[in-house]
Amino acid sequence: MLTNSEILGLFRQTNALLHGHFILRSGLHSREFFQCALLLQHTHIAAQVCGDLAEKARGIEAGCVISPALGGMIVGHEVARALGKPHIFADKEEGRLVLRRGFQIQKGMPYLVAEDVVTRGGRVEETIAIVREHGGVVAAVVALVDRSGGNLPDFGCPFIALAELVVETFPPDQIPADLAEIPALKPGSK
C-alpha cells in the first residue's frame, strides 16, 4: 500500500501536481492543483493507486461502483475492475449530474461512489443523491485524494481516501496578496 508521501511523489513524477493560482471546482482558490488526468494517463500508475484504493474498500459490500464524470470515471472504472464489480457513471448535463447512457440504479443494491479528488464533496453529494433517488444504497465513498482538510460534509456513509494531502485553499474574498498577483487558472473539469 502506497504512503501519502509516495502518492505525492507519483503526482510530482507525472507532473500532475501543478503550482500557481487555481480556482477549484468548489470555487475555492489554491496554490496547488492535483490534475489527476496527468497521473492516471499512465495505466500502470492508475492500476496501482486505484488497486490500493480498492484494497482499502474491499470489506465493504457493494454490487456496483458509480462515479461522477469526468474526474471520477477512471478511478471508478479501475476500482471496480480491481474489485470485480461493474462500473457506471453519472454524466454532466446542463451543469448537473444525471444518470444517462442506459445506466440504471438497482433498488436496494449497495453502491460504492468513487472520485479522484475531494475538496468539498459537491460532485460526490450529487452522485449520492442520484443513487438514493433511484432506490439504491450508498455503502461508502472512496477517493484517491482527500484535500478537504477535514471539512467534508457528512455523506451518511463511510469515507475512505487513499491519501490525505493538506493543501491551502482560500475563499474568493480572502485570497492572499501574492496569490492575487498571479492570473487564476481553472484547469479542472467544467
Image (cartoon, grey):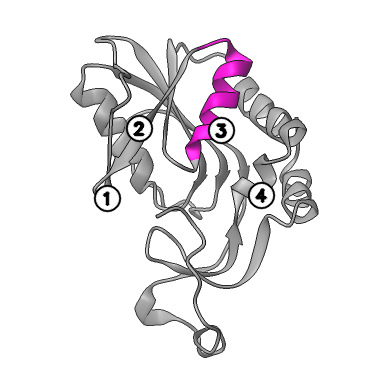
* Residue 41: image location, x then y, percent: 68, 41
User: How far apart are labels 2 and 4 at the CA level?
Assistant: 22 Å
Q: Earlier in the sequence, mark 2 or mark 3?
A: 3
Q: Which residue is mark 1?
A: 95
Q: Nearer the viewer, mark 3 or mark 4?
A: 4
Q: The disc labelled 3 sits on which kind of residue?
A: Val
Element on which disc 1 rests: loop
The furthest residue to the front: 101
- Please give the range of residues in magenta: 72-85
Circle 4: is it few (<14), some (14-19), or many (20+) Cα within 10 Å?
A: few
Question: Which quadrant holds residue 68?
Answer: top left
* Residue 71: image location, x then y, percent: 49, 43
Mark number, residue 105: none
User: How far apart are labels 2 and 3 at the CA level?
Assistant: 13 Å
Please give the name of the residue rendered at 40% of the width and 52% of the height, measured from the top-left corner.
Answer: 120
| Quadrant of image for the C terminus | bottom left
Please give the name of the residue rendered at 65% of the width and 64% of the height, measured from the top-left corner.
Answer: 18
Please give the name of the residue rendered at 31% of the width and 31% of the height, measured from the top-left corner.
Answer: 128
Mark number, residue 38: 4
